[in-house]
Image: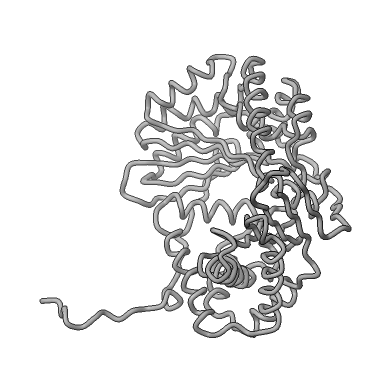
Amino acid sequence: MLLDRKTAPKIHDAIEFDFILPPVNTYKLDNGLPLYWLRAGVQDVVEVDWAFPAGQWYEQKQGVAQAVGNLLKNGTSKRTAQQINEAFEFYGATLKVRVGDDHAIVSLYCLTKHLPHLLPIVHEVLTDSVFPQEEIDIYKQNTIQRLLVNLRECEFVANQKIDALLFGESHPYGRYTRQDSIEALTREDLSEFYKRSYNLSGAKIFMAGNIGEQETKWVNEIFGAAEISQTVAGELSFVLQTAEQRRQHFMNDENGVQGAIRIGRLYPNRHHPDFAPMVVVNTLFGGYFGSRLMSNIREDKGFTYGIYSSASSMMHGGSLTVHTEVGRGVIEEAVKEIYHEMDIMCNERAGEDELLLVKNYLLGNLLGDLDGPFHIMQRWRTLILNGLDINHFNRNVEIYKSITAAEVQTLAQKYLDKNSFHEVVVI
């Protein structure tokens, strides 16, 4: 049958599509460790993630979580850092460590057939890292040099300041790296945090790719045979110390030609019923290139190359922050326009066409996130680490599709009241 090339195909909005998160398999290793695995894709590649409660929330000494994450694969009792790196390179594999506010994720990427050769090396790294003193010295020297360079940049300092104002400098989400805290780190600090936070008893394992039961058996042979303790770490709690002074301006460089603006507030995390609908509100306000903030402050006023607002969800809190850098001479006008856009969001309902565009943008991105095994497993990993399930995903999709302009305005009045924000300007 020939195609009718004279008639254009019908264009469908993303809100008309069905969004199905493929199910994940759950498997318990012989020692009780959970393995979540997903078979998808056609390429013989695999990603394995080990998630640990080893983020900044759990550190008892400032900077230790990042230091351990950076030095995790820099030496065991059997191999040097060079030997570990060469072992992964020999198989064309990559091992990455990402340390966040709450979790540290150790990720292995390799060809599926090489998995049985690489899993013992990962196990060695996760259970036998020794943190050689010479590696610690190099890390501290490089980190301090990088910090001193970054501290000259107004945007780096502004990011530090806004978190400290919202959460307090002694709170894990508000602390920021200082030179003296890096210098004070010892090998004993790193070893103690590693033994406590990278204990396999607290790990969750995720695996995705063109895999099946054979690959789960390989994981079980190595990690299911490991001895694990059943002790459960005690719950930690920290007191928020949000600054009373809402407007703070800092002179970081007398000769600086631009200023970094950060306007933020505390915000519920993804467990709160307002979080999902606020994703729509925030996208409309400043969450994508066609947002209100971008249209006004970049396109209309020409004050900046880019401005956006982001919602951060952590296990024990969250924040909503506007980020931009503008010319020194237009800082005051830019700040005024940001608050003006907040007022419009609160006082006027969005048009149906504009709201539909935002919905299609969000759902279109979601379609991309459901393409490929690694993206799909990342969705599942976020749900599982936050104690959520498929119902949460489905509810969010329905909210993105059905939220009304009236609901957007109500949420804006609740969360975009300019009097509830803290403001940081750094020149």
Determine whether, in the image, residue 77 is placed left or right of residue 318. Answer: left
Q: Please indicate, yes or no, whether residue 395 appears anywhere in the rendered image.
A: no
Determine whether 97 is above or below 400 in the image.
above
Above or below residue 115? Residue 4 is below
Image quarter of residue 123 = top right
Residue 366, percent across and down?
Answer: 47, 64
Measuring from the top left, give residue 196's x and y in whole percent.
72, 31
Q: Is residue 377 above or below residue 340?
A: above
Residue plotted at (52% across, 45% down) = 206
**Left or right of 3 in this view: 123:** right
- Observer-nearest of 417 and 219: 417
User: Residue 162 versus residue 28: which sits nearer the camera?
Assistant: 162
Near-viewer residue (284 or 299) = 299
Q: Residue at x 60, y 53 (%)?
A: 384
Image location of residue 111, percent across then percent down: 36, 36
Residue under the point 75% across and 55% down = 424
User: Which residue is the extreme one toward the left?
Assistant: 1
List x then y, in percent, for residue 365: 46, 64
The residue drawn where x is 40% and y is 50% is 39
Q: Quadrant of the N terminus?
A: bottom left
Name the foreground residue: 278 vs 121.
278
Quarter of image, res 53: top right
Task: Answer left or right for 231 relative to 400.
Answer: right
